[in-house]
Amino acid sequence: MSARSTAHPSASAPTAGSGPLRIVVVGAGAAGSLVVFHIARLVAAGSAGNSNTAGSGGNSNTAGSGGDRPSVDVTVVDPLDPVSGPAFGTADAAHLLNVPASGMSVVPGERFDFVTWCVDEGLTSPDDATYFFAPRNRWARYLRTRLDEARAAAGDRLRVTHVRSTATGISVDAFGVRVTTADGSAVVGDRLVLATGLPGVGDGWSPCDLSDQPRYVGDPWRPGALDEVLADDGDVLVIGTGLTMVDVAISLLRSGADRRVEAISRNGRLPRRHADRYLGEVVPDIATWGESLDETWAAVATHVARVERLLGNWRPGVDGVRYRVAELWGRLGHDERALFVRELAGRWGIHRHRMPSSSGVLVDEARAAARLVIRAGRITGVEPGPDGITIRTADDVRTHSWVVNCTGPQSDLRRLGNPVLDSLFRQRPGQDRRPRARPAHRRRAGARRRRAARTRSGRSARCAEVSCGRPPRSRRSGSRRATWRSPSSTTGVAEGLRHDTVIRRAGAQVALINTATPSQISAATFTTSIAT
């Protein structure tokens, strides 16, 4: 992307048919870069929209039409470089992907593209590449490489401008979508994609505000946030025991032989480890799993237990359920979703979002040497001091040289203080109302469809699709059908896309893309957002 700090696109709207389709992407991290990558591929293929009509005041054009001017004009708004956000901007090679290389290809239909790239780069051997957990910064370089290649293939039909400023507001009018930036400028487009990535970390665990304390790190992924901590040899308390803690603890423990790290969370649960080899995924038939959270949770437990009895390992069962997460989530009403987030999400997360086996070995070694201590407890008091921070729990009081917040993303987007998201919320009537539960007649209709499916099949939830890690082929064995399942297929997109919403107002469209697994975004997602 060209680095242009002040040369913003014109804020005036062109007349119908006079200019290219204008797409504004807020965010240049992995999600935003994947958006531009897929747009470039669609433009290069001449299929980014046959007769793209932006509505009243918009443009009508064909993305692959060629000509002297570009057919698609993309403006990326972000002060940071491409793919340099919190997840993939880390410089520590010990921070690994928690998905094997075979699940991280960005090229639709080419599952092993990243695998091949890792071998070509000398990161791993061909024999180990499929189940290789690459450093996250290497995947960032891979995405940048594929992005550059896709832009080159699109040629003059695609123009990409990088506005190095922070988006502060969004408004929609008859001319399209207008994004204001921190320097007071405006970028206008026919389509807007909010590729903001995961929300920032939350600090609701603390009884008081620690943001101005020099020995408190509120966001470990902020560039340079851990530099002073790594340079010191004092003991560190990490708040949270999830995957972020694993990465931070590995970095801290490598910075000094005498370093001691303590991690605390309400339950003291660590993410489980990936298996040492690829075991496949067993994808269940969920037609008879019921409507309620209790029924769904029980069915998931039954499925995972059955897979463990069959294969000797629970992981293929959990990995198979992820292909059904979007549909299962859609069956739940608001109250049951809130209950899941409050009571069950943590238990599901430690099994679904696992640490690489090599990271697990480092954690086990550090715990065995008493250099890493995992605790369960609730923090009841915090007292900052000149040489550290004193933390009070129900069990004891301890003083630590440093405290690092690794509690994970803030769950309520309205509390982030993100001006661009706040401006979007203000434009949506009823934004503060709770989502309505699904009407009873729709729940009953869904139950009838599942009962009919159960009657037709006669196999209930015993039927499953099994991905067995072999070359694509199909075979039948008893009541189970084994088929090849590609993690980058559109079936797996729904879980990766936490928000995929199109808001239509005054002929403009806003696509919200907030992805936890950006590699699973498919071109089909953007065909809908761009070409409709």
Image: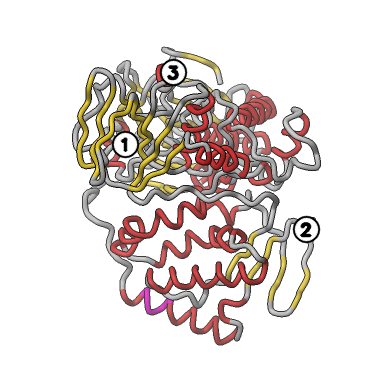
Q: Which amino acid, mark 2? A: Pro
**Label 3, label 1: how many angstroms apart (C-alpha)?**
30 Å
| Mark 1 residue crowding within 10 angstroms, few (<14) / some (14–19) / many (20+) | some
Q: Position of residue 78 (x, y in %)?
A: 43, 24
**Label 2, label 3: how many angstroms apart (C-alpha)?**
47 Å
Above or below, comparing residue 339 to residue 172 in the picture? below
Foreground label between 3 and 1: 3
Q: Does 443 lie within the magenta span? A: yes
Q: Residue at x 56, y 21 (%)?
A: 1
Q: Mark 2 = which residue?
A: 472
Q: Residue at x 46, y 65 (%)?
A: 328
- Front residue of 270/460: it is 270
Highlighted magenta segment, given as a residue range: 442-446
Q: In this rendering, would 43 be left or right of 80?
A: right
Foreground label between 1 and 2: 2
The secondary structure type at the circle numbered 1 is helix
Q: Mark 3 = which residue?
A: 227
Residue 9 appears anywhere in the view: no
Of the numbered discs 2 and 3, the one sitting upstream in the chain is: 3
Q: Residue at x 55, y 67 (%)?
A: 304
Q: Mark 1 = which residue?
A: 421
Q: In this rendering, would 522 be left or right of 59?
A: right
Q: Position of residue 176 (x, y in %)?
A: 37, 34
Q: Which amino acid, mark 3? A: Asp
Above or below, comparing residue 451 to residue 469 in the picture? below
